[in-house]
Amino acid sequence: MGVCRRGRIAGSARSPVPALGRPRDTGHAESATESIWDGVFTEEQATRGKAMYAENCASCHGGELTGGEMAPPLAGGEFMAGWDGLTIGDLFERIRISMPQNAPGSLSGQQNADILAFVFQANKFPAGTTEMPKEAGILKQIKFEVKKP
């Protein structure tokens, strides 16, 4: 394990995340040291993510992140409730292994982090001064919480 520039411990163990439906609780959220409300991405990162989302995600999840026939929404109550209490790392891993649907795993860690920053911005989470890291182990230290703690 190592420590990242934000002082979080980066773990090397990865938990499998189911391909469909709500991910099973891996128990990492209880040990998370930060919250999504702590400004874990930058505006610039979300701007890059918006362009990548339009290119790689919008055809299924919709231009407004409202979902489609075969894809769930990435904004709003259903999305928020589905990830509440888990970690950003859980969501990042889900994207990494299963998206985009026509070419799973084809996006880089940086591209996935940028897209996730855009999704968080669209869900009205605050931006900060440090970009979201692209390492799942680090992101597992950040809790996804619907309500501000």
Image (cartoon, rainbow, N blue to C red):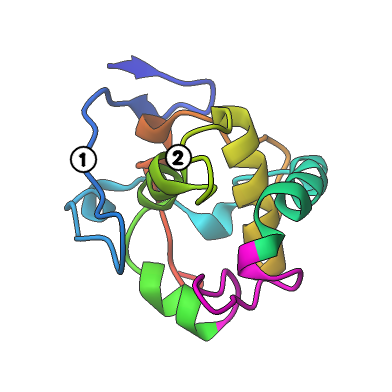
The relative height of residue 6 versus residue 22 in the rendered view (above or below) is: above
Q: Is residue 11 left or right of residue 113?
A: left
Secondary structure under tag 1 reads: loop
* Disc 2 residue crowd, few under 14, some 14–19, many 20+, Cα 10 Å: many
Span of residues in magenta:
60-76
Task: Name the residue tied to disc 1.
Answer: 15
The relative height of residue 57 versus residue 45 in the rendered view (above or below) is: below
Could you say which quadrant of the image residue 118 lies in? bottom right
Could you say which quadrant of the image residue 131 lies in? top right
Q: Residue at x 64, y 59 (%)?
A: 119
> Residue 91 at what x, y percent from top left?
42, 52
Q: Amino acid at mark 2?
A: Arg
For the stretch drawn in magenta, the main secondary structure is loop
Q: Residue at x 82, y 41 (%)?
A: 44
Task: Name the residue tied to disc 2.
Answer: 96
Secondary structure under tag 2 reads: helix
Q: Is residue 147 visible?
A: no
Give the label, 2 or 1, closer to the camera. 2
* Disc 1 residue crowd, few under 14, some 14–19, many 20+, Cα 10 Å: some
The relative height of residue 11 versus residue 112 in the rendered view (above or below) is: above
> Residue 144 at what x, y percent from top left?
43, 60
